[in-house]
Amino acid sequence: MAFPKHVRLFEMGARDGLQNESGPVIDTAIKVELINQLSDTGLTHIEAASFVSPKWVPQMGDASAVMAGITRKQGITYSALTPNVKGLEGAIAAGADEVAVFGAASEAFTQKNINCSIKESLERFAPVIEMAKEHNIRVRGYVSTVMGCPYDGEIDPAQVAAVSRDLLDMGCYEISLGDTIGVGTPLKAKRMLEAVAQQVPVEKLAAHFHDTYGQALSNLYAVVEEGVAVIDASVAGLGGCPYAQGASGNVATEDVLYMLNGLGIETGVDLQKLAQTGHWITAQLGRTSGSKVALALGCN
Ligand SMILES: CC(C)(COP(=O)([O-])OP(=O)([O-])OC[C@H]1O[C@@H](n2cnc3c(N)ncnc32)[C@H](O)[C@@H]1OP(=O)([O-])[O-])[C@@H](O)C(=O)NCCC(=O)NCCSC(=O)C[C@@](C)(O)CC(=O)[O-]
């Protein structure tokens, strides 16, 4: 298959990026400023907040205030995670443009992350998706641990395909495939994608790869070559999952963008502006950027 002409980047820094920060809860004003800066880079999709239990993920406890504080730019979708109806109610009240339910291909990870089995998670998502539909809000579905689980180990691609198909059938418009702990390699990514694409059209799939083992860009190349045209990434490579021990951040958006630019694939995103934003947020967090491209460009 040929490379797509255009790839949509879905920016994760403000949610997947910041949710895992240890230490004190980051000021709402910093989160708001991060999203406002990201809104000025050409990105069209920004995951801005997470309406989960603040006891489970304290860093996301100010989701409503973040959504209220941002300056919304026309043409940008500001989305939020909603694990249940309570979360969806919060997201609707806060004016989220789009929401996401998040499941996994592994039983153990599902238990650790959202305190239920895969079957129960799907039962819990059904009313979320129904209610979102009534409010004309699109729902994205995440499937975590698509190439390995910190608790269950190897994951059968058929299991990834089955959960993805269930979420699609329930009404999710897009399925984001999460290599939560970044253990994938290109061949594994390709095989996993092939298995899922038998159940879900590739146009409805997104790649959400973490870079724990430094394989994320290679894995992305492998699935983009198979037609995946939506990539989740996190500015400066921020983040990780609080319920996936040892997982490092998403692949850095700057690094993905540099690769896509080199392939002649359009994104509409300005690399310099993005790298500056990555520089700004990592300075706020007291560290250097996790993006090799940003460092090479002198943003450190
Ligand atoms: C799903 C629950 C809530 C179940 O948690 P639970 O404890 O089973 O829920 P519960 O229904 O029994 O409620 C317990 C308490 O939480 C409250 N509660 C219940 N729901 C909400 C809500 N929405 N917002 C705020 N509060 C809520 C509820 O009101 C109650 O409060 P209490 O009476 O004890 O004071 C919990 O497990 C949870 O919040 N988990 C979130 C975990 C999480 O956010 N993980 C990170 C995101 S996933 C990820 O990063 C992976 C991804 C997407 O990026 C892809 C990849 O990389 O693979």
Image (cartoon, helix red, strand yellow):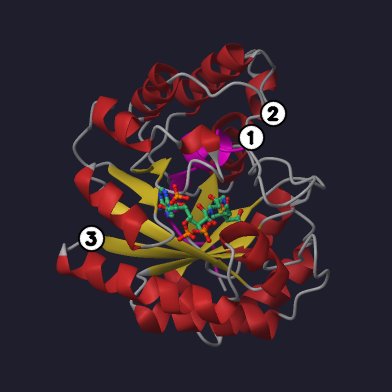
x and y percent of residue 55 in the render?
A: 53, 42
Task: Give above or below for 71 relative to 58.
Answer: above
Residue 63, position as x, y percentages in the image? 37, 37
Residue under the point 47% across and 47% down:
53
- Circle 3 residues within 10 Å: few <14, some 14–19, many ≥20: some
Q: Residue, x 74% and y 46% (percent of image)?
A: 247
Q: In this view of the protein, can residue 293 be seen by the observer?
A: yes
Please tell me whether residue 193 is drawn above or below residue 61 in the rendered image.
below
**Quarter occupied by residue 148:** bottom right
Q: Quadrant of residue 254?
A: top right
First in sequence: mark 3 vs mark 1: 3
**Circle on res. 194:** none
Secondary element type, mark 2: loop
- The residue singled out by tag 3 in the image is 137
Dot 2 alpha-carbon crowd within 10 angstroms: few under 14, some 14 to 19, many 20 or more: many
For the point 74% across and 53% down, which residue is it?
A: 182
Residue range of the region highlighted in magenta in the rendering: 2-20
Nearer to me, 62 or 261: 62
Please name the amino acid that badge 2 sits on: Gly
Give the side of residue 260 with respect to residue 295, left or right: left
Q: CA distance from mark 3 to mark 1?
A: 28 Å
**Does residue 18 show up magenta in the picture?**
yes
Residue where numbered disc 1 is placed: 237
Residue 290 is tagged as 2
Which comes sooner in the sequence, label 3 or label 2?
3
Q: Is residue 106 visible?
A: no
Labels 3 & 1 near each other (Cβ < 8 A): no
